[in-house]
Amino acid sequence: MTGRRLWLASVSHYRRHPLQLVALLLILILATALWSGVWDLTRQARQSLQQGTGLLEGLQEIRRQDGAPVTVADFVTLRRAGVCVLPWLEVTPANGQGRVIGIDPLSLGCFAEGGQSGLPQRIQGGPFEDIGRAIESSPNTPATAGFRLMASTAVTDLPSGYRNVPAEPRLATGELADSFLLNLDALCVLVLLITGLLIRSVYLLGLSQRRASTQLLTRFGVPAHRLHRMRLVELTVISLLGAVPGTALGLLMAQVFAQGFGRVLSGLFDVTLVGNAITWMACLPIPVMIGLVLAWCSFDGREDDTGRRRRGDRGRLAAVVLLLGIVGLILANTLVLVFAALALVFLGVGLLTPALLARGLDAAARHTAKPLRLWSVRELSVMIRRLGLPVVALQFAAATVIAIQALVGTFETTFYEWLDQRLQGDVYLELREPADLPRVEGALSGLESVAQRYTVQRDRAELTQPQPVSVDLLALPSDSSLLHHWTFLSAVSDPWSQLDRGQVMVNEQLARRLGLATGDRLSYRIAGQAYQATVAAVYADYGRPSGELLVAASSLPAAFRSAFTSVTVALAEGATPADLRAALADALPGVRLELRDTASVRGLATRIFEQTFLLTRAISMLTLVLAGVSLLVLGWVFFGTRRWYFHLLRVWGVGRRALRWRISGLSVAVTLMACLAALPLGILLTWVLVARINPLAFGWSLPMAVYPLFWLQLVVVAGVIGLIIAWLIQRRLDERPPEPVTVGQLQGAER
């Protein structure tokens, strides 16, 4: 037989069954688009993270000895003393997109003369721009906030009153950001696993339908190894036809999601997403997807007698793997180990689910006396075994959606409760110049429209014990009743009174990072003054990875200068924000204030954090749709192979309507069993996300919560998929019944 005719004979299967080719290509395109889109975003994020960590290489920061923040006057003093320094201002633009670093380009000349010739090239483009434009891009940020002076590490002689410290990023969040990206990558690996299951199930169905023609070609003298090579070429071509457009679609999806993803990175990890040109790394999903398809589909998976005898051994091995995975989830202390243990859990569950469901049905059949019910249970057992791969894929996808929904729902509920306790007042006043605080407080105290208020001051503090680290500083009045509604993760009795006595509070991120707990002692410096205090409480601080130290405003040293100051105001009954705005305009002419009601602040925070889980929601839902559509296609095809047996029921006297109900029951039962089997896995995955992965990836923990109403929605979706399968097969019941097709023809084994 000539090569051309042999190829025509081989691919003619897809002419007879075009739906299988469409299913393969659809699965490949959607899965590749999902993975390549997230891969490109995480690739850009890692490059941006690497670029950000290298910005301060070879630099040190110059600070004042008295602890006061440096200003432009200090820059002038140092330059006149012959010290080569670079003004460095980090701001967030008004549009909230990323981070901008303002520098003085003229000051770079002395670095080149002093042996730092690579610095001017390293800090060109990306987040850098002229310091004047940086200030203009963030009009609501005080010009002194975030202002720093950088010098070469070779500079050692400084004028009196100044000291040098290692230059560190404002937020040391590289490890957390990398964990967050690893979290997304792991979700994509799960998508690839589900994709492999679906592709293998579709391809094995095609192989079973082509087995007779393959045997015929072998009898005509075509060597088996040649048929195997042709099959590999066929798989490669199909993979290319799906992976190439899928990768292009994924890159387009990455561009669509880039803006929101960049806001998430900037808000959570202080990482600016810098767009990178498309390189060969962006096309990596193509060879990976081809390799995945070849690895999963290059063997037909037929089971011989020895394999059937070892089925029990495989079940015991799967149980051991599942147990090891659960133990690993409990004991793992790094994100990589957690994902490895989770992979063992998925492997064990995937191997056990079809066998356990089938055994349960077999046991139910032994206790069934009615013939038709016995036939239905036995038929359902056969379907679970033969549709094992797509059933497991739907189970994995449904479990992932359950866990993601629980994570997002819990996060939203917890975050809104946290916002409620943080936004106790009605109006939020932000001072453009912190030095205006005494005038603002004096004016507010004389207004009848103001019922209560408290001042928020922010800057930086230096921890010296238990380990040296720079942290955010938050100063609050300990006697404000607006703050006494806070809930703490752990606290001593009456923590606000203890705060007034000199104790401190720390956020969860700092407590986790340094292993701090209530009652621990720590040492710190504020504006050059040393303190020692006991931790009175640990509080939740969602949405920021940086460590934070909370002290009483009354304990601040006289030399303290706030980098950011705001006042939260509770209005008197009947007063409005407009009334307060007008009164302040009359009482404080020339003072620049930004007045916002707390509803607008809440709306801004909500919009930012909705972006955090947008990708995970999209990935999980599209994966569920992919698995559901694939099970629909495979179920329809498999039901088509059972039409002969359905026709026999008609011959034996089962009415048309009764047969339709029975077929509907079978198809709905398959999808419902897959969905119900996903519930325990989804609950376990929920616990892993909120209690194990989330603290490692974001730096804070969430309470465990489940949402049964959402489970019910998934069950309804599974039932709808089953009804669609039943409707499709019922349309073919009136056709001439086909020749009987045995299960042995489908999977190489007799029923």
Image: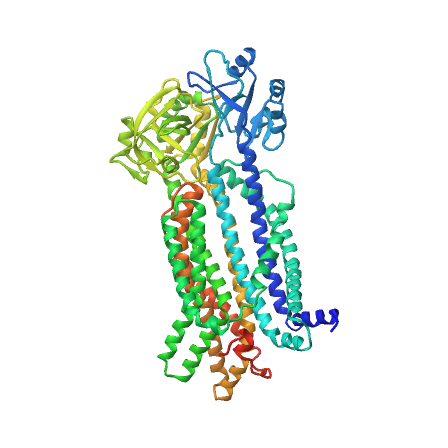
The front one of 582 and 216 is 216
Q: Is residue 525 left or right of residue 56?
A: left
Residue 134 appears at what percent x and percent y?
57, 28
- The answer to whether residue 309 of the structure is visible from this angle is yes
Camera-nearest residue between 150 and 671: 150
Is residue 124 depicted above or below 303 in this figure? above
Figure colour scheme: rainbow
Front position in the image: 125 or 363: 363
Is 38 rendered above or below residue 419?
A: below
Position of the N terminus, as image quadrant, is bottom right
Q: Quadrant of residue 681?
A: bottom left
Residue 112 in the image: state x and y as whole percent. 62, 20
What residue lies at 60% left-to-right and 56% top-to-bottom?
Answer: 291
Residue 417, given in percent of the width and then of the height, sits at: 37, 43
User: Percent position (x, y) of residue 92?
Assistant: 53, 32
Write the residue at 33% across / 23% down.
531
Q: Is residue 729 above or below residue 534?
A: below
Judge left or right: residue 117 versus residue 465. right
Labels in figure, total: 0
Please tell me which residue is depicted at 41% across the width and 33% down the height of the picture: 547
For residue 330, above or below residue 523: below
Quadrant hosting residue 370: bottom left
Residue 384 seen from this side: no
Q: Is residue 268 left or right of residue 229?
A: left
Q: Quadrant of residue 423?
A: top left
